[in-house]
Amino acid sequence: MADYREAPLATRPKTLDPNEYFNLSPHFRRAEEERAALRANLKRQYQLQLNNPHRKELIEDPALTRWVYARTNPYPHFRPTNKTSLLGLLFGVVPLFVLYFTFKTDRDNREEQIKAGTLERKFKLAY
Amino acid sequence: MAGVVGFQRWVRALTRARVAGMPALLSASRAASGPSKGMLPGPYPNTPEERAAAAKKYNMRVEDYEPHPDNGEGFGDYPKLPDRSQHERDPWYSWDHPDLRRNWGEPMHWNFDMFIRNRVDTSPTVVPWHTACKHLFGFIGFMLFMFYVGEQFPAYQAVGPKQYPYNNLYLERGGDPDKQPEEVKNYEI
């Protein structure tokens, strides 16, 4: 497998990563072993719960809980900085005014045209 | 943040001992049914001990753990994982959740729901990205330019006004049948 060339739409799988074979530095190997140990521990916990014949409930995934909690509770960690204030303005305040003025001017022009009788009322299929 | 704490104190002062219903949602005490406070995401870690504790909490190595930069955007201590879609993961490995290509307990990317296999795909493209962009926008730009040129210099078969027989349809156009119409010649010899 030394001459493996990945298919155009795929990234190289971990098992064929050249680092796995040629990077013999103990530092890298120890890092990989630690990661594998963490992964194996998680796998073991999951398999124990999965194959437990007395289990009646769903297996709860703490990583999922943490992810959901992090995504739904950003507010305690929010701080108004230049960037966040600018983004807040751009997405929250500016569209309000821009859209209001755009729609107002457009509708006013339309009303004027209707009153003047210049609006072309074509047959519209959609509405 | 300070406003929320002040509100909580006011609510607690009003409801005193028993917290039930709506005030329970705003009180600072939570039910014991979920994970403990230490297992949930917290604020940005500043000291090395906090970093190590956060790495342990998220089941990552201390060297691998890298929190999002602390710029007040609401990430807290959640780890910054590489922006790789689930498309890129090995399809043949026996994942715990094969459709998500994820193992139980593995730290999830902040935008995990964007990187699932129905959505954004970050796998390498067949041709390099800039080449693909150049080809596509070059083609579209060229076609637009040529259509514009075609609008400016139209080229079609020459046509003239339609010619009708019988003296330009004298009788059909309501001409007097008794009167002799003037001769109309639509040709030249």
Image (cartoon, grey):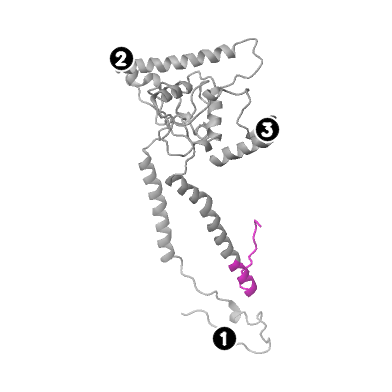
**Chain for disc number 3:** B
Q: Position of residue A37 (x, y in %)?
A: 43, 14
User: Relative to B30, is B156 on the left or the right?
Assistant: left
Badge 3 amino acid: Arg
Mark-to-mark CA distance, 1 and 2: 109 Å
Q: Evaluate whether residue B153 shows in this view.
A: no
Q: Position of residue A56 (x, y in %)?
A: 66, 15
Helix, strand or loop for disc 2: helix
Q: Position of residue B143 (x, y in %)?
A: 41, 54
Q: In the image, which is nearer the foreground, mark 3 or mark 2? A: 3
Residue at the image point whose x is 60% and y is 24% from the top: B34
Badge 2 amino acid: Pro
Above or below, B115 against A100 in this view is above
Q: Which residue has dot 3 on it?
A: B16
Residues under numbered marks 1 and 2 in contact, where contact means CB atoms less than 8 Å apart = no
Mark-to-mark CA distance, 3 and 2: 61 Å
The disc at residue A26 is 2
Q: Which residues are magenta?
A: A108-127
Question: Does the magenta portion include A10?
Answer: no
The disc at residue B183 is 1
Q: In the image, which is nearer the foreground, mark 1 or mark 3? A: 3
**Chain for disc number 2:** A
Closer to the camera in the image, B32 or B144: B32
| Dots 1 and 3 on the same chain | yes
Residues under numbered marks 3 and 2 in contact, where contact means CB atoms less than 8 Å apart = no
Question: Does the magenta portion include A119?
Answer: yes
Badge 1 amino acid: Glu
**Chain for disc number 1:** B
Mark-to-mark CA distance, 1 and 3: 111 Å
1 or 3: tag closer to the N-terminus: 3
Badge 2: residue crowd in 10 Å (few <14, some 14–19, many ≥20) = few
